[in-house]
Image (cartoon, rainbow, N blue to C red):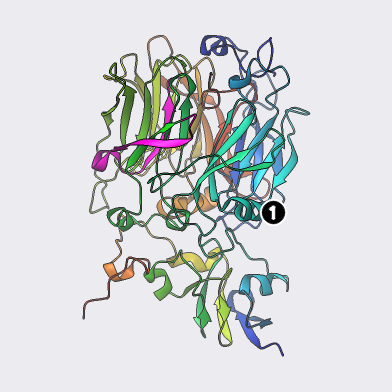
């Protein structure tokens, strides 16, 4: 499936994107790093065409060249930000390894069902040329690509941004300065407001070995959002979220390029932070969703949700969030971004015992990463967070592997329902149980495209 | 002349290997076809952790283990060098005490990572 009719990649507007053909293939990373299986991590192609005989199955596996990458997030070489550039196409998926530092450039266009490795940007070369490690979020901006890194070459915060050209050659660091930013993680930009917002996880040396909760109190984890002057490539303002914003992870602006409203999920506080530019031109923030900690029969202290991701539908009407430790996915109507309304909730896995089995498969882990179809009707959800963190909270995932489920979303009236006919059980993979994480669609999705 | 150490791997039938004492164990064992997990290769991520059950290693360069993990014998093979002859358990079978649920089983202040740990009260 290719992008829209005209010009370059992507769509002229979010409204055009919503009208695109339904996704038929999904690309999902699956990991063996940290599982005890001595095989490379891989990019799985999942058949999402309900009319296909292999619907809801992994139909291709592209192994990385070595073991131990820990594939995690990924991004496209091009999106709607170069819709007007007919010389560009959404052909390559950039897939970083958080632990190895390697960036895998994968050609998905030559044969969309069977992606092939185009190039590997060597992790050691990135370290030596840019002093960066721990790659995370990939965004293109026009024909160029920037990737957030969480550490320097020694794994210490705050890291910075790798700049690649469209040939995937290292251009150096993207940012002019990191200012006094202590940590990096995710970022999103909104060019018409000349703004980028970045969030904070922790230094690679802090989060890669697992989660020592005690280190939050020692200020080893983030609690701020950073406003950037996008063109000047400099941070200009910090929003200190404090206890309301412990471990602020995913940042999403409205897809509408005119809007200054954006959202961030604070994982440990399990809150959604809403930020926007006031009429006076000042950046403001507020907490709009607060997921309460839940009692657990065997724990001395209540369980936090661990809201590791958020997602905004292409029409900017719904916000989706997960509580990885609780086990629920939620849908909120954010038509009024100051006053979200809970419109849907489903359970899968989690530590509270609400849905240990879904569609006949025991779910290890909880809802963790998800991708929404452009029309907003299908939300694909996976269950693994990060190998070391999985091993701490859900040790059974080692033998059971991760799963991918699909949630049917009611875009008219709100509401969510787990689709009974779709489940991809990564516990049944040929080389043994693997763990699935982030998903992208060949024709674009709800976390890839930005409009200039 | 190269100084060598003898490495015994107890969960591989007690197999023994001669290694260069100055080089990281991950490299010298993999060169002898021991299949070992690894990730960052600089001591920052615990993917290559193994359990030391006899002998001493120098793993000054590791920055990922907390003091409880170190007290439980964990060593990061990507940076650890054998000071003496040693015995190891390798792979995820050795990871029974490497991971903990931090909400169920908190660390004491002296069990944190070295840069933030406080001495154990007498």
Q: Residue furthest right?
A: A110
- Residue B36, quarter of picture: bottom right
> In the shown orientation, is residue B25 left or right of residue B95?
right
Q: Residue furthest bottom?
A: B1
- Residue A142, quarter of picture: top right
- In reply to whether residue A244 is colored magenta, the answer given is yes
- In reply to whether residue A239 is colored magenta, the answer given is yes
| Residue A430 at x, y percent in the picture | 68, 46
Which quadrant is home to the N terminus of chain A?
A: top right
> In the shown orientation, is residue A34 left or right of residue B69?
right
Element at badge 1?
A: loop
Residue bearing the label numbered 1: A66
Give whichever of A36, A224 is nearer the camera: A224
Give whichever of B122, A190 is nearer the camera: A190
Residue beneath the point at 57% across and 70% down: B77
> Label 1: chain?
A
Residue beneath the point at 60% across and 39% down: A163
The boundaries of the magenta stretch are A230-254
Residue beneath the point at 37% across and 28% down: A263
Give whichever of A144, A406 is nearer the camera: A144
> From the viewer's perspective, is residue A190 above or below residue A363?
above
Is residue A296 among what the camera can see?
yes
Is residue A330 among what the camera can see?
no
Q: Label 1: how many residues lie within 10 Å, few (<14), some (14-19) or many (20+)?
A: few
> From the viewer's perspective, is residue A188 above or below residue A105?
above
| Residue B74 at x, y percent in the picture | 47, 72
Which quadrant is home to the C terminus of chain A?
A: top right
- Residue A47, quarter of picture: top right
Q: Number of marks in the image? A: 1
> In the shown orientation, is residue A6 left or right of residue A163?
right
> From the viewer's perspective, is residue A339 above or below residue B7?
above
């Amino acid at each position: 499936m290719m992008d829209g009719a005209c010009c370059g990649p992507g769509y002229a507007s979010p409204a055009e994107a919503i009208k695109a053909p339904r996704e038929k293939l999904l690309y999902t990373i699956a990991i063996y790093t940290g599982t005890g299986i001595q095989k490379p991590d891989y990019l799985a192609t999942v058949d999402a065409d309900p009319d296909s005989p292999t619907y809801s199955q992994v139909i291709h596996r592209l192994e990385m060249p070595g073991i131990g990458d820990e594939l995690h997030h990924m991004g496209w070489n091009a999106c709607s930000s170069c819709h007007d550039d007919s010389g560009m196409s959404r052909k390559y998926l950039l897939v970083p390894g958080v632990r190895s530092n390697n960036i895998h450039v994968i050609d998905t266009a030559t044969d969309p069902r069977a992606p092939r490795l185009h190039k590997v940007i060597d992790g050691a070369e990135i370290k030596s040329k840019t002093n960066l490690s721990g790659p995370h979020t990939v965004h293109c901006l026009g024909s160029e690509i920037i990737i957030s890194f969480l550490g320097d070459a020694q794994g210490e915060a705050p890291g910075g941004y790798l700049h690649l050209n469209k040939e995937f050659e290292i251009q150096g660091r993207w940012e002019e300065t990191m200012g006094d930013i202590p940590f990096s993680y995710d970022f999103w930009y909104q060019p018409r407001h000349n703004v980028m917002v970045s969030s904070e996880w922790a230094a690679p040396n802090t989060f890669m070995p697992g989660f020592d909760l005690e280190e939050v109190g020692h200020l080893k984890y983030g609690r701020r959002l950073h406003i950037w002057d996008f063109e000047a490539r400099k941070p200009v303002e910090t929003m200190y979220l404090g206890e309301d914003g412990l471990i602020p992870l995913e940042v999403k602006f409205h897809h509408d390029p005119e809007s200054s409203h954006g959202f961030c999920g604070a994982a440990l506080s399990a809150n959604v932070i809403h930020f926007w530019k006031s009429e006076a031109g000042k950046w403001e923030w507020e907490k709009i969703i607060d997921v309460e900690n839940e009692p657990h029969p065997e724990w001395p202290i209540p369980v936090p949700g661990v809201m590791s991701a958020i997602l905004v539908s292409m029409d900017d009407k719904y916000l989706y969030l997960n509580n990885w430790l609780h086990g629920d996915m939620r849908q909120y109507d954010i038509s009024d971004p100051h006053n979200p309304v809970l419109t849907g909730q489903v359970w899968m896995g989690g530590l509270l015992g609400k849905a240990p089995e879904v569609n006949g498969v025991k779910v290890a882990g909880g809802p963790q990463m998800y991708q929404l179809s452009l029309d907003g009707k299908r939300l694909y959800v996976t269950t693994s967070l990060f190998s070391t963190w999985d091993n701490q909270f859900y040790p059974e995932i080692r033998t059971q592997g991760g799963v991918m489920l699909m949630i049917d979303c009611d875009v008219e009236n709100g509401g969510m329902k787990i689709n009974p006919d779709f489940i991809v059980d990564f516990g049944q993979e040929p080389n043994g149980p693997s763990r699935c994480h982030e998903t992208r669609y060949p024709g674009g999705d709800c976390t890839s495209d930005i409009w200039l | 002349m190269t100084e060598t150490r003898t490495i015994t791997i107890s969960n591989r039938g007690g197999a023994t290997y001669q290694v260069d004492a100055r080089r990281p164990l991950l490299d010298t064992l993999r060169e002898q076809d021991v299949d070992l997990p690894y990730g960052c290769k600089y001591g920052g991520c615990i993917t290559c952790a193994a359990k030391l059950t006899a002998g001493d290693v120098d793993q000054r360069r590791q920055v990922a283990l907390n003091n409880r993990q170190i007290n439980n014998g964990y060593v990061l093979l990507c940076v650890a060098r054998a000071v003496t002859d040693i015995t190891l358990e390798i792979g995820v079978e050795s990871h029974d005490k490497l991971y903990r649920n931090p909400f169920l089983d908190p660390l004491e202040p002296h069990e944190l990572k070295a840069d933030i740990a406080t001495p154990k009260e007498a």
